[in-house]
Amino acid sequence: MDPESIGWFVWLAAGAIFLLAGLAHGILGLGFPMLATPLLAILVDIRTAVLLTLLPTVTVNLISILRGGGWGESIGRYWPLALMIPVGSVAGTWLLVSVDPAPFRLLLAAIILLHLASHRIRGAHLQWVRTYPWAAYLLFGLAAGFLAGTVNVMVPLLIIFALEIGMAPAVMVQVFNLCFLAGKTAQIVTFGYTGVLTSSLIAATLPLAAGAAATLFLGMRIRDKVDAETYRGWLRKLLVVIALVLIGQFVHWFWRA
């Protein structure tokens, strides 16, 4: 993709979106692609939104893993989940490159709504997750990776898995960021192989990654000073609005198709 094909307004909007998403990730420990991707998808197609978020997401995930502390122990226990993520991510990315990305707006909206309802899904015939953990690693890992490849969002499934298996909150942040990083790495390789991701696009998103990193550190510093539950409430309301906009855009595309 040629960076010059993206309008200046989209670049400015992407910068503002990544600053907001970096701050949210710093405060909550996760959520950068969950917030940045649907906001960008309101302005551009899903494929472009995913491409623009690649480098910033990897930057945010790396910093989160290294700054979290104790990540080696967390990863040592839950590495099978992260191992499955790239497999699903490659499959999802190939699909995103091969077909019209417009229908993925509806999928992204559905994933957002799933995320918002994930706390209600816990315990709904998911007892098998603890009984057969390796099967859970395989299923949730592949499915989460596929969603990461198509709509750049895997956190709803990871949250459901983490709640069911009894993962501690601190471990959750480490494992989630490792999964995000594994998925993004596989996606970058796939996009590069197909020729969709170019060196000029990577260079153009460097300032966006730097901005996201700056607000990430800011969010980490104020994490203990902000009422996280209130912030989550605002974020949930925003995600509902975004999901409704994406559904409206999909209906408009489907009506014209």
Image (tube, helix red, strand yellow):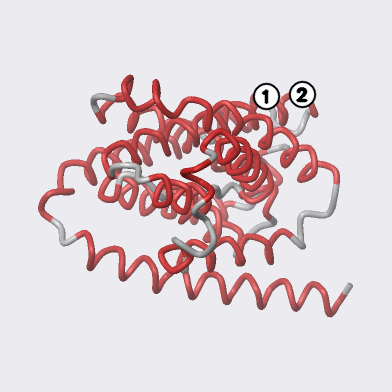
Q: Residue at x 31, y 70 (%)?
A: 233
User: Which numbered disc covers residue 54?
Assistant: none
Residue type indicated by callout 1: Val
- Rendered location of residue 1, percent (x, y): 73, 37
Residue at far front of view: 131
Q: Residue at x 47, y 54 (%)?
A: 160
- Rendered location of residue 241, percent (x, y): 49, 75
Graded by Cα atoms within 10 Å as few (under 14), some (14 to 19) or many (20 or more), the crowding at tag 2 reads: few
**Quarter of the image where one finds residue 41:** bottom right
Residue 126 in the figure: left or right of residue 3: left
Q: Label 2 near label 1: C-beta < 8 Å?
A: yes
Q: Residue at x 29, y 42 (%)?
A: 168
Above or below 176: residue 123: below
Element type at mark 1 = helix
Q: Residue at x 65, y 32 (%)?
A: 187
Who is closer to the viewer here, 49 or 64? 64
Who is closer to the viewer here, 161 or 125? 125
Residue 32 in the figure: left or right of residue 45: left
Residue type indicated by callout 2: Tyr
Graded by Cα atoms within 10 Å as few (under 14), some (14 to 19) or many (20 or more), the crowding at tag 1 reads: some
Above or below 147: residue 89: above
From the image, tell me which residue sits under label 1.
Answer: 189
Above or below 83: residue 6: below
- Rendered location of residue 165, percent (x, y): 41, 45
User: Which numbered disc covers residue 193?
Assistant: 2
